[in-house]
Image (cartoon, rainbow, N blue to C red):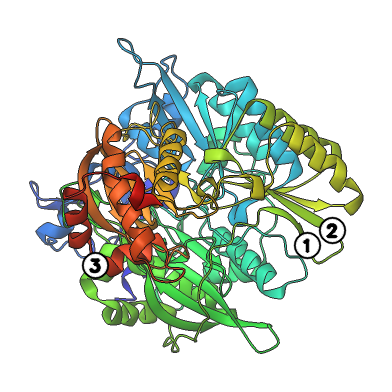
Amino acid sequence: MAATAAVMKTAVVGDQKVPASGFFGRRSLRWDPVHRSLRSLPVGPTSRAIRATSSPAATKPSESEVKRSKVEIIKEHSNFLRYPLNEELETEAPNINEAATQLIKFHGSYQQTDREERGKKSYSFMLRTKNPSGKVPNQLYLAMDTLADQFGIGTLRLTTRQTFQLHGILKKNLKTVLSTIIKNMGSTLGACGDLNRNVLAPAAPYNSNKEYLFAQETADNIAALLTPQSGAYYDVWVDGEKIMSAEPPEVVKAREDNSHGTNFPDSPEPIYGTQFLPRKFKIAVTVPTDNSVDVLTNDIGVVVVSDSNREPQGFNIYVGGGMGRTHRVEATFPRLAEPLGYVPKEDILYAIKAIVVTQRENGRRDDRRYSRMKYLVDKWGIDKFRSVVEQYYGKKFEASRELPEWEFKSYLGWQEQGDGKLFCGIHIDNGRIGGTHKKTLRDIIEKHGIDVRLTPNQNIILTDIEPSWRDSIAASLAQAGLLEPEDVDPLNLTVMACPAFPLCPLAITEAERGIPGILKRVRAVLDKVGIKGDESLVIRVTGCPNGCARPYMAELGFVGDGPNSYQIWLGGTPNQTALAKCFMNKVKIQELEKVLEPLFYNWKISRLQNESFGSFSIRMGLDKLQDLVNKWDGLVESTVA
């Protein structure tokens, strides 16, 4: 099995040899079942035929190997993500065709329309940056702030994966915006599409903490390892000018290593090949106790393991997490990652690469609903999955090391970095920076030359603040209404919501725009049943079941399942280590109080000491809670006292 990727086929386009499309060896993806032959198909921005110069034996593949989704065909014929995107960007039309729409995702963009407009569609593009560990240099922040005003809708959105999103970019401005980001120390390459997405790590700039620094460095290296290599991104957006910093030698060495059959030799994409991955792929790195990254929701979770002196020695690796699902299709489900094993620190890039290749070679490419790695792990079981990964890794995994309990950490407020400077974590409602908040943050960041970090909870951290600046910065933040964490309702500190309407094509109902009203109503019910205002629970809201705001980890999750209605999920924990369960379907937004009032009242009167709402929900059982909701007649004064 380890040899399948090592078989490489080349082709001649004009006078130039290029890699031909498809995976080889075990998969013969160019087989034409009608003509019973391997076909030569056009590739790239020309219609010139490709003539294969070498190929595996033309044995007929099985039906499961022949069947592929439409997106797989588009990727195969794209000349490594160039065609037809490069041609579509040159047309006068405000939109791009279906194939280019799929390819531009790999470049960090989604084509969108305003779903609230009737009649003629108004097309625009969402751009997403890629910021490993959430790191944003001063120069890039200022550029993004300017671009939002000049070419977007005037706001910056912080995502749940530590990146920026710009909304409302017109097609005619895409190249200007993308090239500006690239030339200001940023990138959108791989922020979307069927490949590794942004690599999460704790955002806190604890500059004297070896474990945090090592986790952030590891996230940077993993991101570099799995960044596309063909140059298509730079060809399309900056006319081939490759603007990037030198990579660490250990990253280059790990990428080029093919001692266990992981690579496509002589390919512009040695790890991804022409097909890239079956679906998006998510990785998070963290340190013991710090679960700010929702580590178990990722395809791969990586946790630093240190000795008694807190000197990093290696990593525990977890695999198979993922949030997306489809309503009324029980074969799709959210899933938590499970332990794969331990690797010494010098092997982490090779282990990550082996896992990615295992998914590349075995993940489903026929039905995108089942293409995430979680379904492969679930189908095979962890033992078989580990065995296959070990073939590509070339070693056995050691047993996972014991770790302490996880905690959710937000890094809000003023804290010491450990190097004599301060950082300030600022709560941003729904991750949306606009208006006075946006202007104030820009003024502070520009005046002091501050770098920033974005958190997986959609907040922002101002870093490297001299103690003498603190008072003036604090005064500016307060004047703009950017509150200290103790002045924010605790519900708001942990809530997350996806953008949903009006631009997301998958949204079924509101999320970001609906969350302020939902939180007010939740707080009102808590007050009504007598739960004091400093108590909270983790609430997350998405407009569809894809789970971008990770609602299936919430103590109280709302998942859009119809116009103005939600599935309600219960049972996550404050430290993000338990999967919630679906409690009710089709709950209309105007009916929320009828569900929440009996739940919160019984939490108040029946919980154990310091028991969270999510833990209470699981202990009581969803059937019992459903019975309580069904029989609820409302509160009377004496029950609240």
The x, y position of residue 142, in whole percent, is: 72, 35
Q: CA distance from mark 3 to mark 2?
A: 55 Å
Give the mark, 1 or 3, whose residue is nearer the N terminus: 3
**Nearer the observer, disc 1 or disc 3?**
1
Vertical comparison of 343 with 135: above or below: below
Q: Is residue 38 left or right of residue 221?
A: left
Q: Secondary structure at mark 1?
A: loop
Q: Residues within 10 Å of mark 1 (few under 14, many from 20)?
A: some
The picture quadrant where one finds residue 289 is: bottom right
Per the image, the residue denoted by label 3 is 26
At a point 64% along the width and 64% down the height, the residue shown is 216
- Which image quarter is the N terminus in? bottom left
Q: Nearer the viewer, residue 164 or 516?
A: 516
The amino acid pointed to by label 3 is: Arg
State yes or no: discs 1 and 2 in contact (Cβ < 8 Å): yes
Check if mark 1's residue and mark 3's residue have beta carbons within 8 Å: no
Under circle 3, the secondary element is loop
- Residue 46 percent location from the top left of the image: 38, 32
Task: Please name the residue that numbered disc 1 is placed on.
Answer: 417
Horizontal and vertical percent position of residue 7: 34, 67
Is residue 279 something that shows in the picture? no
Element class at badge 2? loop
**Camera-nearest residue between 245 and 589:** 589
Instruction: Name the kind of residue labelled 2 in the image.
Output: Lys
Q: Gap in Å between the C-alphas at discs 1 and 3?
A: 51 Å
Asked if residue 613 can be seen in this view, the reply is: yes
Instruction: Residue 141: give its label.
Output: none
User: How dense is the environment of label 2, judged by Cα within 10 Å: few (below 14), some, or many (20 and up)?
Assistant: some
